[in-house]
Amino acid sequence: MKTKEPKHPMQSAQESAEHGALTAKLTDARMSSKAIHDEIMAWLDDAKAENLVSIDLSGKTSFGDYMIVATGRTDRHVGAIADQIARKLKEGGMRGVRLEGLEACDWVLVDVGAIIVHIFRPEVRTFYNLEKMWLAERPPETGTH
């Protein structure tokens, strides 16, 4: 009789403890989007994402609190970064994490609700230049239309 291999490779005690702490942290209803943002930024750095830019969306839009823009060196790197971020969020208990753009991996969007992560290949990031649009100051509102 052949035994089935475990789904996940054996983890060290430290890795298991870290995973347990992460799960508790991400599923804590009181955890702020800033704390989740900080975790994602650290994971992007661990995945060797380049040129990380974090944009605070407060007062600019109602669809999220933060936008993170990062670059992967190749399409495979972009896809691997996105997969890793989504996997860690899901392992941490986050629900509703969505990925868009994995087919081509030129630009992959990871939607975490209050945080939107854009991962680009270098030339695609240069072309779209999201930072320029979202880092610009909002024009003052006038009383007449």
Image (tube, helix red, strand yellow):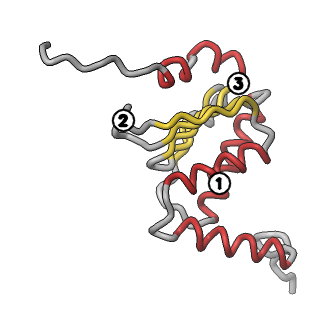
Separation (CA) of disc 1 from disc 2: 23 Å
**Does the image show residue 70?**
yes
Image check: 71 left or right of 127?
A: right
Q: What residue type is labelled 3?
A: Arg
Q: Do the residues labelled 1 and 2 touch (CB within 8 Å)?
A: no
Q: Which of marks 3 and 1 is in front?
A: 1
Mark 2 packing: few (<14 Cα in 10 Å), some, or many (20+)?
few
Q: Identify residue for label 2.
A: 59
Question: Callout 2, which amino acid?
Answer: Gly
Q: Name the residue under label 3.
A: 121
Relative to residue 35, is residue 21 drawn left or right?
Answer: right
Q: Number of marks in the image?
A: 3
Q: Which residue is drawn at 66% across and 58% down?
A: 88
Q: Position of residue 31 (x, y in %)?
A: 50, 64
Whole-angstrom CA distance, mark 3 to mark 1, is: 22 Å
Earlier sequence position, callout 3 versus callout 2: 2
Q: Give the secondary structure at mark 1.
A: helix
Mark 3–mark 2 Cα distance, whole angstroms, equals 29 Å
Residue 108 shows in this picture: no
Tell me the quadrant of the picture where the N terminus can be found: bottom right
- Residue matched to label 1: 39
Q: Give percent across and percent down for residue 34.
A: 53, 52
Q: Is mark 2 on a helix, strand or loop?
A: loop
Q: Position of residue 10 (x, y in %)?
A: 85, 74
- In primary-sequence order, the first of circles 1 and 2 is 1
